[in-house]
């Protein structure tokens, strides 16, 4: 029984069990795999959930700020807020608009 093992032995035992399991395929979701195996590997599953969560990303918003920084140059400081919004929108969506017009 797992309760009879020391706190050090339990994670080692789980790791031994885990290391003997088959690898999942590249298309399978590892978080779902850990959810399915959390009863048999509770300690490792808790670590997996903590460290495998997808971090929030601000890349898209950073790209928009970068684009607006390129548009609002020292020579274009008199652009209104509405014009800047429109230019940023067009800059970020121009490729999609071209693709749609060609179909």
Image (cartoon, helix red, strand yellow):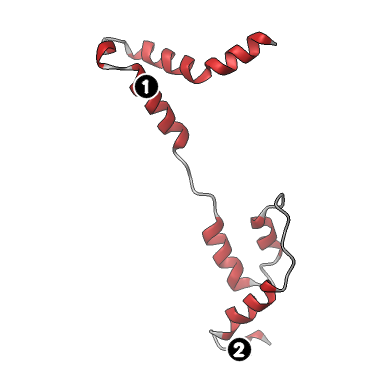
Which residue is pictured at 53% across the width and 18% down the height? 93
Check residue 5 in the rendering and tell me which mark sits there, or answer none.
Answer: 2
Q: Secondary structure at mark 2?
A: loop
Disc on the earlier residue, 1 or 2: 2
Q: Is residue 76 left or right of residue 101?
A: left
Disc 2 residue crowd, few under 14, some 14–19, many 20+, Cα 10 Å:
few
The residue where tag 1 is placed is: 68
Asked if residue 62 is positioned above or below residue 11 in the image, the reply reads above
Give how far apart the Cα atoms at labels 1 and 2 are.
Answer: 60 Å
Disc 1 residue crowd, few under 14, some 14–19, many 20+, Cα 10 Å:
some
Count how many numbered circles sit on residues in the image: 2
Asked if residue 7 is positioned above or below residue 60 in the image, the reply reads below
Asked if residue 99 is positioned above or below residue 32 in the image, the reply reads above
Q: Is residue 77 left or right of residue 51?
A: left
Image coordinates for residue 3, horizontal then vertical, percent: 62, 86
Which residue is pictured at 73% across the width and 70% down the height? 21
Res. 11 image quadrant: bottom right
Q: Secondary structure at mark 1?
A: helix
Check residue 95 in the rendering and tell me which mark sits there, or answer none.
Answer: none
Q: Quadrant of the N terminus?
A: bottom right
Which residue is pictured at 31% across the width and 11% down the height? 80
Image coordinates for residue 72, horizontal then vertical, percent: 32, 17
Image coordinates for residue 39, horizontal then vertical, percent: 68, 71
* Residues at marks 1 and 2 touching, judged by CB atoms closer than 8 Å: no
Towards the viewer: 33 or 94: 94
- Mark in the foreground, 1 or 2: 1
Res. 99 image quadrant: top right
Res. 84 image quadrant: top left
Image coordinates for residue 38, horizontal then vertical, percent: 66, 67
Q: Quadrant of the C terminus?
A: top right
């Amino acid at each position: 029984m797992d309760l009879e093992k020391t706190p050090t032995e339990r994670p080692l035992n789980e790791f031994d069990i885990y290391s003997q399991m088959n690898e999942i395929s590249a298309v399978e979701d590892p978080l779902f795999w850990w959810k399915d195996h959390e009863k048999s590997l509770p300690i490792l599953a808790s670590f997996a959930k903590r460290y495998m969560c997808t971090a929030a990303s601000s890349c898209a918003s950073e790209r928009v700020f970068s684009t607006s920084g390129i548009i609002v140059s020292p020579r274009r400081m008199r652009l209104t807020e509405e014009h800047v919004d429109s230019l940023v929108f067009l800059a970020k969506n121009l490729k999609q608009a071209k693709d749609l017009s060609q179909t």
